[in-house]
Image (cartoon, rainbow, N blue to C red):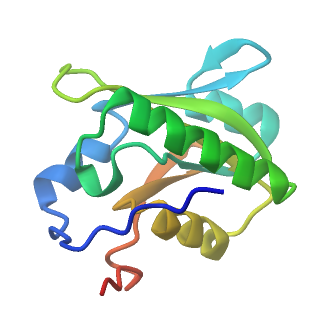
């Protein structure tokens, strides 16, 4: 299995970038049985979950082929771990950032979600609970330790 490229220089998470993760302005959808649902509707029918993307690590724009490769590796890792998942899409409604595809993960706790987020070099991930979409940052949790 191909190893993930380790990023050497980490930019701090700015308040602008953190606000861009919020839903809204980001349009987050979860694919359930071939239908794209808003995150709260998916939570109503399937329970609380986390959303993580492997796309564009640390907000460094990758090519589509690089992102596709990361998605395949991420999905394989999740499925091999026996975690229930569904595809997700986060869309910047202003169109200034490409859609990011990822996975909704059920049956894991916040610590596991944090580890996945860190492994895939993400600044943040989503926690979806009834009536609320939370953005949790890995930076604030002390999870960025780069050599």
**Which residue appears at 56% of the width and 25% of the height?**
38
Specify whether 88 is left or right of 13: right
**Which residue appears at 21% of the width and 49% of the height?**
19
Q: Quadrant of the C terminus?
A: bottom left
Q: Position of residue 145 (x, y in %)?
A: 35, 85
Q: Position of residue 100 (x, y in %)?
A: 41, 33
Specify whether 110 is left or right of 120: right
Specify whether 93 is left or right of 116: left
- Residue 87 against residue 9 in the figure, above or below: above
Q: Position of residue 61 (x, y in %)?
A: 24, 41
**Which residue appears at 23% of the width and 49% of the height?**
60
Residue 122 in view in this figure? yes
Q: Position of residue 26 (x, y in %)?
A: 33, 32
Q: Nearer the viewer, residue 81 or 68?
A: 68
- Residue 78 against residue 102 in the figure, above or below: below
Q: Quadrant of the N terminus?
A: bottom right
């Amino acid at each position: 299995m191909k190893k993930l490229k380790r990023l050497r220089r980490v930019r701090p998470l700015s308040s602008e970038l953190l606000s861009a993760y919020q839903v809204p302005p980001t349009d987050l959808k979860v694919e359930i049985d071939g239908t794209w649902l808003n995150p709260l509707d998916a939570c109503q029918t399937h329970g609380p979950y986390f959303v993580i993307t492997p796309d564009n690590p640390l907000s460094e724009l990758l090519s589509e082929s690089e992102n596709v490769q990361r998605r395949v590796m991420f999905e394989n890792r999740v499925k091999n771990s026996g975690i229930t998942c569904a595809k997700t899409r986060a869309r910047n409604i202003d169109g200034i950032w490409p859609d990011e595809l990822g996975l909704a993960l059920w049956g894991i706790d916040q610590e596991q979600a944090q580890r996945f987020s860190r492994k895939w070099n993400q600044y943040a991930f989503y926690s979806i609970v009834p009536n609320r979409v939370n953005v949790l940052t890995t930076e604030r949790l002390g999870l960025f330790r780069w050599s």
